[in-house]
Amino acid sequence: MNADEHGFDWPDKWQSLDRQKPRVALKELQREMPPGHKLFTSKCRCLGRRVDRDDFLFEIVNTTNVAQVHLTYSKETNPTWPWTEIYDSLDEWRHAILEDDR
């Protein structure tokens, strides 16, 4: 794990983003999401990304939920894309990531 400037310990292969990149990732998510997507009506904020894939972690604003999203860099028409997994909390997400890495 590697801690960011806020003291959050990111799982291996994950990192926080510098000042500009969260906005770029959020703009890409908004561009890709078609109506009916899990996050289509949600306000999100990008927290970090996986360094070896196009997976990003978004906070769903005004909830405790976070969403791991695999951006495709294409405007999608199928609401199952971009692939998205929603977790009840940052701790639940981190636990799932650590379990997957075993």
Image (cartoon, rainbow, N blue to C red):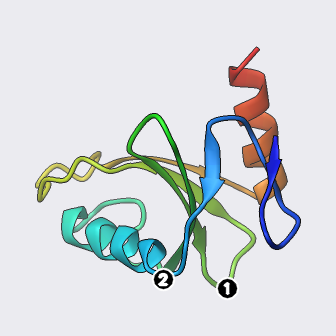
Q: Quadrant of the C terminus?
A: top right
Instruction: Using the rendered view, name the quadrant where residue 7 is placed.
Output: bottom right
Residue 48 screen position, x and y as percent:
58, 60
Q: Are marks 2 and 1 in contact (CB under 8 Å)?
A: yes
Label 1's element? Answer: loop
In the picture of the structure, the residue carrying the numbered disc 2 is: 43
Observer-nearest of 50 and 45: 50
Q: Residue at x 29, y 45 (%)?
A: 80
Classify residue 62 as left or right of residue 28: right
Q: Amino acid at mark 2?
A: Lys
Residue 92 screen position, x and y as percent:
80, 47
Does residue 29 lie above or below 83 as drawn? Answer: below
Classify residue 13 as left or right of residue 7: left
Q: Residue at x 48, y 82 (%)?
A: 43
Q: Is residue 21 visible?
A: yes
Q: Earlier in the sequence, mark 2 or mark 1?
A: 2
Which label number is shown at residue 81? none
Q: Amino acid at mark 1?
A: Asn
Dot 2 crowding, Cα within 10 Å, few <14, some 14–19, many 20+: some
Marks 2 and 1, how far apart in space? 8 Å
Residue 98 screen position, x and y as percent:
78, 30
Q: Residue furthest top?
A: 102
In the picture of the structure, the residue carrying the numbered disc 1 is: 62
Dot 1 crowding, Cα within 10 Å, few <14, some 14–19, many 20+: few
Does residue 84 lie above or below 67 as drawn? Answer: above
Q: Quadrant of the N terminus?
A: top right
